[in-house]
Amino acid sequence: MSSFYSDFGKLKTTVETSPKWQEKVEAMNTFSKFIKENGKGREAQNEAIVVYANSLSKDFKAANMNILKCCLDCIRCTAEVCGIGPRVAKSIMLSLVPKVSGFRCLQRRSMIASWVAR
């Protein structure tokens, strides 16, 4: 990743050592901006970027929604600019689908509960 993004060492240090979520989000947002501006033609990096963002978000289980959002934004940028193949897309979907379906189930349960309470 250092060959693609020269500040990757700084990004990694910030993400791994900073106790402040704001600094982590800022570092990832800077990385996403770099991807938007320089990612064209760098398709070979897409899987590494997705794996890194996924690991930062703890497999999309991060308790801090701001960190989760910036990781998803980084993956979105990568998909839009670099493109992603089926293997990368599968890894993302396997992590995200249970969360979305779980959220939908909770929504349905609360809707049903409020309807029954009437």
Image (tube, rainbow, N blue to C red):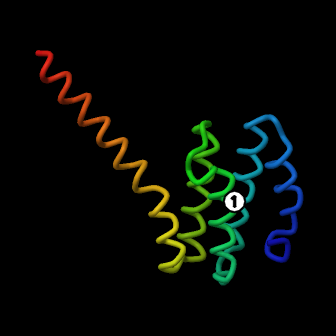
Q: From what the image shows, is residue 78 above or below residue 100? A: below
Inspect the image, locate mark 1, and give the three-letter code of the amino acid beneath it.
Lys
- Residue depicted at x 73% and y 59%: 31
- Residue depicted at x 59% and y 46%: 68
- Residue depicted at x 79% and y 49%: 15
For the C terminus, the image quarter is top left
Q: Residue furthest top?
A: 118
Q: From what the image shows, is residue 5 above or below residue 33? A: below
Residue 17, can we see it? yes
Task: Answer with the quarter of the image where residue 104 lies.
Answer: top left
Residue 36, can we see it? no
For the N terminus, the image quarter is bottom right
Element under label 1? helix
* Residue 29 relative to residue 77: left or right: right
Q: From what the image shows, is residue 25 above or below residue 51? A: above
Q: How many marks?
A: 1
Pick whichever, 38 or 101, lies toward us.
101
* Residue 67 relative to residue 87: left or right: right
Q: From what the image shows, is residue 85 above or below residue 36? A: below
Indicate the position of residue 114 as horizontal and vertical percent values.
19, 21
Pick whichever, 28 or 89, lies toward us.
89
Indicate the position of residue 98 as horizontal and vertical percent values.
40, 52
Task: Answer with the quarter of the image where residue 84 lies.
Answer: bottom right
Disc 1 marks which residue?
A: 33
* Residue 47 relative to residue 13: left or right: left
- Classify mark 1: residues with Cα within 10 Å, few (<14), some (14-19) or many (20+): some
Task: Answer with the quarter of the image where residue 49 lies.
Answer: bottom right
Indicate the position of residue 53 as horizontal and vertical percent values.
66, 58
Pick whichever, 10 or 60, lies toward us.
60
Indicate the position of residue 56 as horizontal and vertical percent values.
69, 52
